[in-house]
Structures are given as C-alpha cells and as structure tokens.
Image: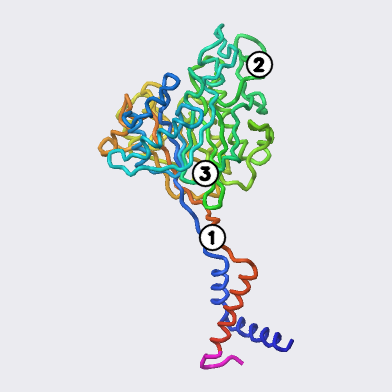
Amino acid sequence: MKIQKALISRFDRLLSGGLLTAGIIGAIAIASGSAQATTLRFATFNASLNRNAEGQLITDLSTPDNVQAQTVAEIIQRVNPDVLLINEFDYVEGGTAAQLFQNNYLSVSQNGASPTEYQYRYVAPSNTGIPSGFDLDNNGTVGGPNDAYGFGFFPGQYGMALYSKYPILEESIRTFQTFLWKDMPGALLPDNPATPEPNDWYSEAELEVVRLSSKSHWDVPINVNGEIVHALLSHPTPPVFDGPEDRNGRRNFDEIRFWADYITPGEGDYIYDDQRTFGGLSADSSFVIMGDQNSDPFDGDSLPGAIQQLLDNPLVNTSVTPTSEGGPEQAILQGGANLTHKSNPVFDTADFADGTPGNLRVDYVLPSQDLEIVDAAVFWPKSSDPLFPLVGTFPFPSSDHRLVWADVKVADDSVSVPEPSATLGIFSLGILGIIANSRRRRKPIV
C-alpha cells in the first residue's frame, strides 16, 4: 500500500508539472493506432452496351474486336474507378457477359491504357422486357416492349452490371425488382385523362402486378477494409415516350423517391425487398447512390423536383459536383435547346438531341454525408484533347452518356487496436519511462 501511494504521489507531481503530457499522448497514440482512411473512386457509366437482340452482347464480347466495347473499356481504364456501375448492360444469367467484358476488354490494354482488374462483379435480373400479360400502354393490344414490366424487347435488355475491386457481400445484397408501385405511400400513379376517376390509368388487376422499378433497385454492400459502404444502384425510366398521363415521368419521380425514402430513417418502413424483408437502410450506414437517374435539376422533361429528392436530402453529400470542360464547349457548339437551359453545362453528363431536350445532367454519384468527397469529375474532354475521340459527337463511338466519378474517403477499420490489457501495459510503460527519465534531470522533482 505504501508503494502504491508513493507511485500515485509521484504521478500527481509529474502530471502537475506537465511532464506526462507528451508521454500520455504518445501512449494513447501507440495503443489506439493512427486514424486512417481509404480514398475510393466510385463511378457510374451508362455505356450503351445494350443490344437489339437477345444474345448479341455475348457475341460481341466473346472476341476482343468490338470497337464500341474497346472504346468503353478505354474510358474505364483512363478513369480507373474502384467501384463501377454500368447502366445499359444487358443482363445475362450467370454473369457471362460481365465476365467476358472483363476478360476481353477491361483486362486488355486499350491504346496504351493500363488494364483495369475487377475481382468482384454483380449482376441480377432486370424488369426490362419481361412480359406483364397486360396492356400497360392502353393501346388496345397486349405484348411488346411497352407492356413489359420495364421497357425492353427481351428480358434483361438495358440491365446493369456492378464491378468492384473490393469484396461484395453477396449474402447481404437486397434487390427490389418486384416491389409494386402501388405499395409506395402517395405514389404518383398515372391518371387516365379520358375518365373522371383519379389515378386510374392502370386497372385494379394491373396495379397488382405493375412494378416500381423499370430495371431494378439494388442495395449492394461493399467491404472497404472492414467498413461497409452500401452501393445503391438503379436506372429510372426516361420521363418521356408516353402521353398526357405522363406514366413514365411519374414513374421516374417515384423511382428516384425510392432511394430518398430508403436512406431516411422512418421513411422507408414500407419498402420490402425481393425476399419480403421490410425496411430501409439503417441510420448509421454509409452509402453511395449511383446511376443514370434520367433527371436534370432544371432542364429536360422530368417532373419538377424529381432529382432534388436526392440532391436536397440532408443525408446526401453534394459538397462537390462533378464537372467537365467538354460539356460547356459542346453546349455552345451544338446550340439548340442548350442555349436556353437553366443548368450550367459544366455539370452535363449526357449528349442528347440538340433540338430537345439538349444536353443534360442525368448521371449521378452521391455519397452519404459521412463520406468526404475529395474530387469529382465528368469524363468529357474538350475537342482539342487527345482523348476526345473516346466520347466524340453523334454518332457516338462509345455512348451518349459520359462516365461520372467521385473520389470519397472511407474510414479504415483495419487498424489493429490492442486489447485493454495491452493498452494499459503500453500506457504504464510510458509512465514508468517518464518517471525514470525524470530522475536523470539536473533538478530533481521533490
């Protein structure tokens, strides 16, 4: 007991003299490890790798000679994302097409660019081209792409594919392909203007099968050195190609709203996945929303406020907006609707028809607020840039969309933290070392 009191007395005098400060900080730093973060590049690219016939994509990707696929692959290699969503990539069961694109294009240097290797990939069925059995466009006949659950000439056309350099937690993936549109509270169901009843474009029987997702919505958790980031992926329908009922515009709005509700605590309780598990994302989750949302904040044909459901959500980090030099240049050169747009063309991500709607910002990479955005850009070089031929002008060598990326910091949970007993031992060694050093001081502490 006397020894213990003596040590405590010596500790108090050292502490009051300020001599322990550096030792304590050093001991704590050693015990807990330095805070670290991993910077990842998340990207979305509507690459127009859809084909007009089922099986054609497999044929095109089975050899390394398809010029469009080579150009798309070179863009990806130049940007080198860590996590990449490709929209308009036909779904093939078993992931065969995604594997072929990796083996024959991404893994092969394109024009001197370094190959990009993705160890992890994910594909899943899309609502596009799956017959509904109903006359959903009300043209008097049943069948064809407009009567499918999502517009498409064959099942899986215009699908999605996810590529990642970090492990995908497949057992925790949630898909929402079969979620019914009517089950969203306050859904903007289309109205038949020829009848007095509201929101009656679809019959009661049709509402029992009409799905919200034109392709699908995916929640794909990715393990980043022990931290989980949820990649929230989708491709809402274009808000056009319909009539006065605006069924596509309304569907686009609600497909975007789905993620806004999913990430907001209490708002996504109604949501159920394809396994019939209810609820949205847990409040402490990190996420990145990615995809061609087919909605510009101010221009184009989407309903007012559609993309603002995400851009104005306080849980979404919009501190850095991806920009390009090529977007403004092409807006001036192409003229037309671009000259009357409200949005700054520096943010444009797609080169659409000049008359209408003009070039728009429709592709997004939106991290959660806890993920710091380090940098972000749209791959759209100026015409004087040697890489401009990769994007070009109509007819486009790659796609009418541009790859959009954002670099975000993800906390690294892989730093080894000692057990409490080890921490105490390190801390004690630091104290004893300081006490020993104090005895060598010219003026002893008394």
Q: Are the residues flagged by discs 1 and 3 in contact, CB closer than 8 Å? A: no
Task: Determine the residue positioned at 59% across, 36% down.
Answer: 260
Please count the marks in the image: 3
Q: What's the residue type where badge 1 is placed?
A: Val
The magenta span reads: 439-446
Q: Secondary structure at mark 1?
A: loop
Q: Earlier in the sequence, mark 1 or mark 3?
A: 3
Name the residue tied to disc 1: 415
User: What number is the disc on residue 198?
Assistant: 2
Using the image as rendered, state which of residue 309 and residue 291 is in the foreground: 291
On the image, the x and y values in percent for residue 235 come to 51, 30
Queried whether the magenta region covers residue 179, the answer comes back as no
Quadrant where the N terminus is found in the figure: bottom right
Q: Is residue 328 above or below residue 26?
A: above
Name the residue tied to disc 3: 367
Q: Nearer the viewer, mark 1 or mark 2?
A: 1
Q: Is residue 353 above or below residue 121?
A: above
Q: Secondary structure at mark 2?
A: loop
Q: Quadrant of residue 274?
A: top right
